[in-house]
Amino acid sequence: MLVLVSVLAVHAARSADRDRQGILQDALNQGYWVARSLEFGHRRMTRDENGDGMRDLVREILGNGVVSLLVLTGDRTVLLASDPTREGARFARLPHDPGAGGQVLRSDAESTEVAYPARFAQAMSGMPGMSGMPMQHDTSFDAAKWVIVTLNTSQAYARYKSSTIQSILVLLLTAGLGLGAFIALGVMQNNLKLAQIRRALQRFVPRTVQELIEDNPEHPMLDKVERNASVLFLDIERYTRLSEEISAEILNHLVEKYFSAFLDIILSHGGEINETAGDGIMAIFTGATPDAHALSAVTAAVSIREQARTLNRSRGPQEPEIRVNVGINTGDVLIGATEIKGETGEHLTYTASGTLTNIAARLCDLGENGEICIAGATAELVRDQVALNGPLLTHLKNVRQPVPVYRVT
């Protein structure tokens, strides 16, 4: 492990040095062409007593945004500068001999300064004019010995800094991974286990139960608690007769097609599929307030009814019309696990239990031709947003008192 870290450290240091040398070389290359541009421009000019031609050329070079300062010096005296106030002053940072390829005078995070030997007099000597005679030129720059170019290299250094930081982070990460290998492996195994549990639960278990198991896989808190909820039951009308009239394969296909559409509607309205049984679905809605979850349940039921009608219009020639009846009730209910024990083991069912749930199931049985029947408690919460017919006091199976039943129009 130490050998690996050492190798990576050496590699990172070498890579950082290469990047920095690359920045300096790029600056030298750019500065070289700036110096040559000055010489070429000077070559194209006739004598200019005021030097305005060269000043215009300097301003044009500065316009590219890369060059921030340009100085033309004699021995150590500034002859021409992008900042005119510096002309006539001494320029202290001059190399003895930068060579034809130039020399870096200084470099920091913002800029890089490079120097090149000036060759104005040599470039002009012997250059023919339009008439074939030697061209006149501005002799005031024949004494120039150096071209000093200051380049904006802040972006290049920012990339260099980012690359260096990345190399350090890779080194630290490698060391950290080596030191914490066993911990990381344990975490990965635990995450894999949770992912496997999640994939399995998504197909068979309500979202609330999934969250409880994920929070505590070893001992999930599935105890029953009293909550205010809206319970929705739906079933396919005449399911038993349909099973006698069409093949099991076609009926199973229809149930899957219709229930798949209903599942998306229930989930999109904040409900949870608690259980499915052949031709029926039980869903629980537990919003922030009774008004909210009651309206979500009723709105979901209306969307289910419309979806069933849409699917019926596009059904195949061998497929019968499917009508879905819905029953909804709202109130306090016990939500949690029901434990069933036997000699061969035990079984847990997560559900909402109580009289409220029983009444919702009976209301579903009461419906005909795709009706949505809701109890009085639900109607009181949604009557301002939903059109209703009723109430009609109705005796439901195994319910002592008659129940006010409303139908959603």
Image: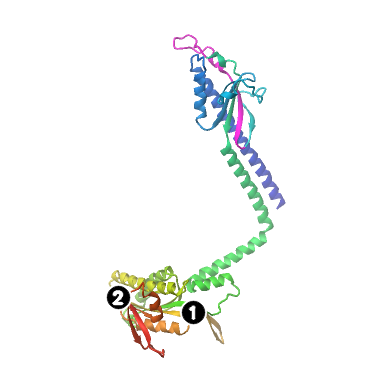
In the rendered image, residue 247, in percent from the top left (x then y), is placed at 34, 78
Q: Is residue 333 visible?
A: yes
Q: Quadrant of residue 180?
A: bottom right
Front residue of 33 and 187: 33
Residue at figure coordinates x 69%, y 49% from the top left: 5
Q: Residues within 10 Å of mark 2 (few under 14, many from 20)?
A: some
Residue 87, image quadrant: top right
Report the span colored magenta.
109-137
Q: Mark 1 sits on what residue?
A: 351
Judging depth in this view, the residue of 128 and 353 nearest the camera is 353
The amino acid sitting under disc 2 is Glu
Give the spatial CA distance, label 1 vs label 2. 31 Å
Q: Residues within 10 Å of mark 1 (few under 14, many from 20)?
A: many
Is residue 347 rendered magenta in the image?
no
283, above or below 79, in the image: below
Q: Secondary structure at mark 2?
A: loop
Q: Quadrant of residue 346?
A: bottom right
